[in-house]
Image (cartoon, rainbow, N blue to C red):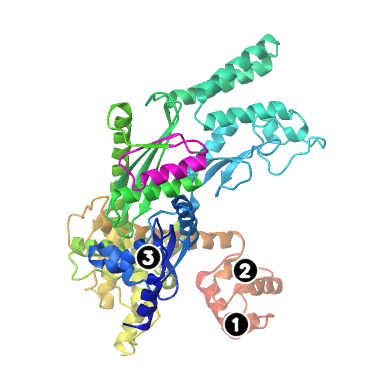
Amino acid sequence: MTEAKEQLAEKLKQLPHRPGVYLMKDERGKIIYVGKAVDLRQRVRSYFQAAHNLTPKVRVMVEKIRDFDYTVTDTEVEALILESNLIKEYRPRYNINLKDDKHYPYLRVTVQEEFPRIHVARRVEKDGARYFGPYPNAGAVKETIRLLHRLFPLRHCRGPIDAEKAKRPCLNRHIDRCLAPCAGSVSPAEYRCLVDEVLLFLEGKQDKLLRDLAQRMAEAAEKLDFEKAARLRDQYRAVEAIVEKQKIAVTAGGDRDIIALAAGEDGGCAQLFVVRSGKLTGREHFFLTNPTGEAGAELLTAFLHRYYTHAGEIPPEILLSEEAAEAELLAAWLSQKRGTKVRLHVPQRGAKKELVRLALDNAQLFLEQEVLRSRARDPQAALQALAEELALDAPPLRIEGYDISHFQGEGTVASMVVFEKGSARPADYRRFRIRGVDKPDDYAAMKEVISRRFARLQAARAAGELPETTEDPFLLVPDLILIDGGPGQLNAALQSLTEQGYAELPVLALSEGEELVHLPEQKHPLRLPRTSPALQLLQRIRDESHRFAVTQQRRQLSRRARGSLLLEVPGIGEKRRKALLKAFGSIKALREATVEELAAVEGMNQAAAASLYAYLQEYGAQE
């Protein structure tokens, strides 16, 4: 037994029979797993004394454990809270976790301020504000805020407002999107009524909100304040229209969350239905990691723990698709957070059972879609699929993509992008200015760029100067060439490859629109399914080559428009450009100058002058 194992064994003997949290560490001291236990001694020792009973993924984790720490607590609920905090802090590799949960946004209403506002927050703090969420879709949260500002004219500006120092109101006041508390146009009491309406809306209590609006509208009409009554009427109608869209009565009245979990081999999906006052007011889905292959009950427990640790609101009842592990402990913890009893329940019949079934169907559907997306994102799977579709001997580890771009026939450029092992390699990207084409001709431009790209490789091979290892992308032979275009562009590339002695290289063209794959000597193009990982990889490479070419072409046109044509010349930067224009006054005068006259300009040298002279003579640049 090694010294490390002896120390680990000795530490296991000293574990107490107490509730607490344990932290597993690897050989570098990095925390790879955080767990809680009713009895630390029994739980931690079980990892090392019953390895044959562990799942394969857990055994992989245990093999990496070289040390552990632990913290005892008075109760298991305290251990649960501490475990959650430590997982959030360390994000261990082998813990079940929400994917990217640190980015989930909240809606924050600053009710602690005299004139509250609503905005997006990234974490819940104990500052007296009201939080709603978290929500996995940040775009939906921002859209909700825009909707609320249309319905309820809360202030948009940040910071405190001093009612005694009235300011000039901003544009939002003039378009009725703010009551302008900064200008003293509204009292704190009246503004607070508006904030209460916002809270009712976010809590899903739209029926009560509509009753309050109707009552205030009638009171304003009785006082002959018809302008206020009309404003309340418009607000009432807007809220009513929104309520009609979501008026799905799902259960008897009351507030509850409905959570169903679909478990997969490497992860899971939790579907959340938010029910307030008996109506379905919101739905979200969350993906979870499952690095140790835990069962569905464990995944569900982990989700409840992670989600409600930072949730802005906990309802009195939570309906589940299956019994969660440690359900009593979770209920006690949730009750402690809420301040009143929280019930976890798995319905067996009736409307609640049907709603849980519907949530589970949604969770399974989202999980299936995520699995398909994950496979499509797997570079190795995409390369293997591409090799099978194209009948290649091996997966193409190095793929080069080419595209041509011009603006109304001017400023024609070409791009070469490189993907290695399914991932982009920007360091090997190259751009080409097309020199031998005087008019718009994508076929001739494609032939030129392929010829120029392989000419250097051919020369080095002929001279026997190919190094064993090189960082020069022009001295590497690609496994596959992708052309952006159709049969015409493909034939131009093939002709150029044949002339350079590389006719054996696999090459194809991908046409935009129908996404057809054109292959040499095949009359009919290949039509791959839209969900094919091979097609999706080709699309990424094609789109990247197009983006790279268009970026260069636009930059070139922009420089021409700004009189910055000189910046295209190697060795000419902004400082030398200014010095040249100051010395000669125009591009036309520069084109008429000799190399010696160009080199005599302050900051220039012979090499830069020679490059500039060749460029100006070749292109005949106009002032």
Cα gap from disc 1 to disc 2, whole angstroms: 14 Å
Disc 1 secondary structure class: helix
Magenta-drawn segment? 314-342
The residue singled out by tag 3 in the image is 445
Q: In the image, what residue type sits under mark 2?
A: Ile
- Answer whether labels 3 and 2 touch (C-beta < 8 Å): no
**Rendered residue at 31%/48% (across/down):** 297
Residue 322 colored in magenta in the image: yes
Which residue bears the numbered disc 2? 587
Query: Which quadrant would the N terminus be assigned to in this image?
Result: bottom left
Viewer-closest of 137 and 603: 137
Tell me the residue that label 1 is attached to.
595
Q: Give the mark toward the camera: 3 or 2.
A: 3
Seen as rendered, the residue at the extreme bottom is: 464
* Residue at the outermost right position: 164
Closer to the chain start, of discs 1 and 2, is: 2
Task: Tell me if 619 is positioned left or right of 504 in this view.
Answer: right
Of callouts 3 and 1, which one flags the residue occurring earlier in the amino acid sequence?
Answer: 3
